[in-house]
Image (tube, coloured by chain):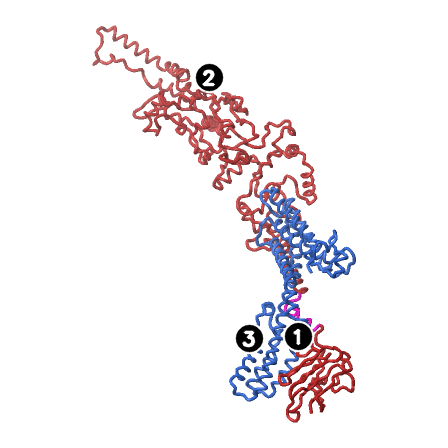
């Protein structure tokens, strides 16, 4: 059921009626009717307009009262945004809603792009100052990726796994492998090799790239299946029953692996941005320190 | 003869242990209770959990009790058929039951393998399904990145600063503090780009004037510091706040770097904006009540009339210096350079001067009449004009020749009245009077000796008195109609040998000493556009154009349209140096700045002074 304004009171909290109706979930992006989006938008707009109106001689740069003001604002924003990592680990009752905090984190992070870029005065070069700016941009872009991933992927993740748990997925494959082992006992060694390879195949092999793209190249299960089918079709083998059984097992293993891989892909995409977002935030803090110290060192 | 149950388990060493039992009926019960056919000792399994029914040789049906769904081939079900030939699995709690067709003595049975699963899932599965193992850890990469950046962008530059702290000049090459550069250096300072310490001498101390003055040794102050301070307007609240902040951060006021901003990109450093000048000069007289400067804030809208420095007297014969006065062009100033020179007469198209110009055109390249360029030659930099000299300019027409010996013409020495007197006397002393025509025997004469005797007497008299005639000639030269008097002011002096002297002539090389005018930049214009010389009948006229003439083309800093935008620095130098203002230099070819302005005022005295010094 879609939410309407009637479901929230003036402060943007869900009303009792909507809570009763079970509509307690409100996306952090829509928190309090996008209050923080509005604040961030107004802040960015003020930044852009003042940038255009205020005449800095000879041209806009990070210095001067305007440049230093933007810089101070940016560094305070960055420090506050970083504090989300601390905030989310604290159990705080009452007003300090984590959802509010995260909503503000997303939108103020976007506003930071505007403010900090204005602080550069669009003077970029190969130096520590631009390094800090570039790291900030990468951190924010990875954050945007994360928000988009959280908007799009969970639905696909859910529909893919179809109420099975990860443990069940693993067991399923292990189970199939065991059955394959049993079923393959009577096979000649030349074809048993294929089944052996198929049994050894798991969904976790390969690096990050393979996991995120979902491209796994040649699959041993597929090869074994093709081999079994070609032999069954040629009708050279009398052990039709075994092939029939192996065909079924391999097909199920293929499906099980496919599901795990899709699951891994979505899960990876939901996680990967944090591997950029978090370490580069700390790199940004380091670059920011170097940036500020350097400015005052060569004051 | 229906089911064979194989209980599989593993020993601690990993060896597989299989226990087999056979059930000879087509229905087998599954549960935790000991009376069940397939016993699963698992608390997650009820006493009687499900029932297996063999429907034909290779097909079994599982049906669970009391709506307890189990996983059949990975799917939840309360009732399912399993084809034992294709294989199938049933998960009940932690037990996995796999169905298959029996072999050998069990060939007509369905084999159910029962295996207790190791506890899968948990942290192990969590790790498998996350990216944790695939990516470097967040914590470790955060540390690595941060430390790398701190080491390379903070520690290393600081080290390089202290490494060369005591060195006069850094060696060329990469120094880590270049990573801190906040923008390209201007062209003039580009050679310092690798040597941050050339200017940033102290850590955490902003660039001080001392660093600039290391190289810029000849920069003069705009005005005395005290006067500068009192000329500045009282800062408003906002400016006061900004000043307080910069004081807090130890930024000196009124330093070189307050106006000359570096690291703003390559190219020339930007000139200070006009407002910088107008802040003080817009209403200077309210704070500096004794100032000679009139208020100015914009050339187009608020700039006083030009006040050239004109010569009021060229000096005197006793070595007195020329006197100057700064006077507004609105006050119709007159000047006295000591010279008589009507421009009108010389520039006429139709008088004797023009005729003479035509006559001498082959020799001197004149046109049909004289024009400005015949006498006024631009200096090498094109800014101003070479001084006028008798020898190169006037003497083209105004000859000082007085005698001819053989083919050589003797001229009077210009600028040296004593020599003029001496030369004339020598002429009269060394030459006789012209011999009378009737003096020779061959000539025709009137009859009678008396006439001859008279002629002889007259000639002798002439010979005797000839040196005395020099006085008259000298007097004539220095008097009205004489060679000197035409152009110079002659005064009688009490000196027996040389009773005349000539008042010195001094020329003005530059009228506007606080402003800069570059003639070269205006060569598209005729001289007459600005200088109304062809109607000036006196050398006393100051032939400078007023500000209105300039404003025909030049507007203020914000001028638009056809007008040339002209801010302060187009004509004025902040540091009062005798060189072109910044904007003029910026436009001209770099380095084309006059080393010094030629001083014309001593020109007249030169020969005499040299001789005196020689003595």
Is B390 colored magenta in this rendering? no
* As drawn, A196 above or below B418: below
* Mark 3 to mark 2 CA distance (whole Å): 118 Å
* As drawn, B95 above or below A279: below
For the residues beneath circles 1 and 2, the answer to whether they share a chain is: no
Nearer the observer, B284 or A209:
A209
Is B124 colored magenta in this rendering? yes
Marks 1 & 2, CB-CB < 8 Å contact = no
Nearer the observer, A247 or B128:
A247
Describe the element under mark 1 as helix, strand or loop.
Answer: helix
Who's blue, chain-wise? A
Q: Colour of chain B?
A: red
Residue B26 placement: quadrant? bottom right
Which chain is disc 3 placed on? A
The residue to which callout 1 is attached is A169
Give the number of the mark in front: 1 or 2.
1
Which chain is disc 1 placed on? A
Report if residue B375 is visible in the image: yes
The residue to which callout 3 is attached is A218
Per the rendered image, the range of residues in magenta is B123-137
Which chain is disc 2 placed on? B
């Amino acid at each position: 059921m879609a939410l309407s304004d009637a479901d929230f009171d003036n402060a943007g909290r869900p009303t009792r009626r909507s809570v009763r109706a079970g509509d307690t979930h409100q996306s952090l992006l829509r928190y309090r009717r996008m209050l923080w989006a509005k604040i961030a938008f107004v802040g960015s707009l003020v930044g852009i307009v003042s940038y255009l109106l205020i005449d800095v001689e000879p041209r806009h740069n990070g210095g001067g009262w305007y440049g230093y003001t933007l810089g101070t604002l940016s560094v305070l924003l960055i420090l506050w945004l970083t504090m989300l990592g601390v905030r989310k680990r604290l159990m705080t009752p009452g007003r300090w809603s984590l959802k509010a905090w995260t909503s503000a984190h997303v939108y103020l992070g976007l506003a930071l792009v505007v403010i900090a870029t204005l602080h550069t005065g669009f003077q970029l070069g190969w130096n520590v100052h631009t390094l800090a700016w570039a790291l900030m941009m990468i951190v924010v872009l990875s954050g945007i990726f994360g928000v988009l991933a959280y908007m799009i992927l969970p639905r696909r993740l859910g529909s893919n796994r179809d109420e099975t748990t990860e443990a069940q997925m693993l067991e399923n494959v292990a189970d199939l492998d065991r059955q394959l082992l049993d079923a393959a006992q009577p096979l000649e060694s030349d074809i048993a090799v294929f089944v052996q390879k198929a049994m050894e195949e798991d969904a976790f092999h390969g690096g990050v790239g393979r996991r995120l793209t979902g491209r796994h190249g040649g699959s041993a299960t597929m090869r074994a299946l093709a081999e079994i089918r070609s032999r069954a079709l040629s009708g050279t083998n009398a052990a039709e029953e075994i092939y029939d059984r192996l065909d079924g097992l391999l097909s199920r293993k293929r499906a099980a692996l496919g599901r795990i891989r899709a699951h891994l892909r979505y899960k990876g995409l939901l996680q990967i941005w944090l591997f950029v977002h978090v370490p580069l935030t700390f790199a940004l803090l380091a670059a920011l320190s170097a940036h500020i110290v350097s400015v005052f060192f060569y004051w | 003869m229906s089911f064979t149950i194989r209980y599989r388990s593993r020993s601690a060493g990993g060896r597989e242990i299989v226990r087999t039992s056979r059930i000879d009926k087509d229905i087998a019960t599954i549960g935790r209770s000991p009376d069940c056919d397939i016993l699963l000792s698992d608390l997650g399994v009820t006493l009687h959990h499900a029932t297996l029914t063999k429907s034909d040789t290779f097909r079994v049906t599982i049906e669970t009790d009391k709506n307890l769904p189990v996983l059949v081939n990975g799917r939840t079900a309360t009732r399912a058929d399993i084809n034992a030939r294709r294989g199938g699995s049933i998960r009940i709690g932690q037990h996995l039951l796999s169905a298959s067709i029996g072999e050998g003595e069990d060939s007509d049975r369905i084999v159910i393998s029962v295996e207790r699963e190791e506890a899968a899932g948990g942290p192990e599965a969590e790790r498998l399904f996350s990216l944790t193992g695939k990516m470097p850890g967040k914590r470790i990469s955060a540390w690595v990145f941060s430390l790398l950046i701190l080491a390379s962008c903070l520690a290393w530059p600081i080290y390089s600063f202290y490494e060369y702290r005591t060195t006069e000049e850094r060696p060329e090459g990469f120094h880590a503090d270049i990573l801190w550069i906040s923008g390209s250096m201007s062209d003039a300072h580009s050679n310092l780009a690798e040597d941050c310490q050339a200017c940033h001498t102290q850590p955490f101390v902003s660039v001080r004037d001392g660093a600039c003055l290391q190289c810029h040794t000849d920069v003069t102050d705009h005005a005395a510091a005290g006067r500068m301070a009192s000329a500045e307007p009282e800062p408003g609240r906002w400016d006061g706040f900004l000043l307080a902040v910069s004081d807090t951060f130890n930024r000196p006021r009124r330093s070189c770097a307050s106006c000359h901003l570096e690291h703003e990109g390559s190219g020339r450093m930007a000139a200070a904006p006009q407002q910088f000048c107008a802040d003080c000069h817009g209403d200077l007289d309210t704070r500096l009540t004794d100032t000679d400067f009139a208020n100015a804030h914009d050339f187009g809208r608020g700039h006083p009339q030009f006040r050239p420095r004109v010569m009021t007297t060229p000096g005197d014969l006793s070595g007195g210096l020329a006197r100057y006065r700064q006077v507004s062009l609105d006050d119709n100033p007159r000047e006295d350079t000591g010279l008589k020179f009507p421009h009108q007469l010389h520039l006429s198209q139709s008088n004797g001067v023009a005729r003479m110009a035509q006559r001498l055109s082959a020799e001197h390249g004149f046109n049909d009449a004289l024009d400005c360029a015949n006498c006024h030659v631009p200096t090498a930099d094109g800014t101003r004009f070479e001084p006028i000299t008798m020898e190169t300019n006037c003497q083209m027409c105004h000859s000082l020749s007085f005698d001819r010996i053989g083919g050589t013409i003797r001229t009077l020495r210009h600028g040296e009245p004593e020599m003029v007197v001496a030369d004339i006397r020598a002429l009269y002393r060394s030459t006789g009077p012209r011999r009378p025509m009737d003096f020779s025997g061959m000539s025709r004469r009137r009859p009678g000796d008396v006439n001859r005797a008279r002629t002889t007497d007259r000639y002798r008299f002439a010979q005797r008195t000839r040196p005395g005639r020099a006085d008259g000639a000298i007097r004539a030269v220095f008097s009205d109609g004489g060679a000197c008097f035409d152009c110079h002011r002659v005064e009688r002096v009490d000196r027996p040998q040389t009773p005349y002297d000539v008042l010195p002539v001094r020329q003005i090389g530059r009228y506007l000493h606080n402003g800069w005018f570059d003639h070269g930049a205006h060569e598209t214009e005729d001289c007459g556009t600005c200088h109304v010389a062809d109607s000036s009948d006196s050398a006393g006229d100051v032939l400078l154009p007023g500000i209105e003439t300039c404003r025909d083309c030049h507007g203020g800093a914000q001028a638009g349209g056809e007008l040339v935008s002209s801010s302060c620095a187009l004509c004025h130098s902040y540091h009062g140096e005798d060189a072109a203002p910044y904007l003029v230099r910026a436009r001209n070819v770099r380095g084309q700045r006059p080393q010094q302005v030629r001083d014309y005022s001593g020109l007249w005295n030169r020969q005499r002074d040299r001789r005196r010094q020689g003595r």
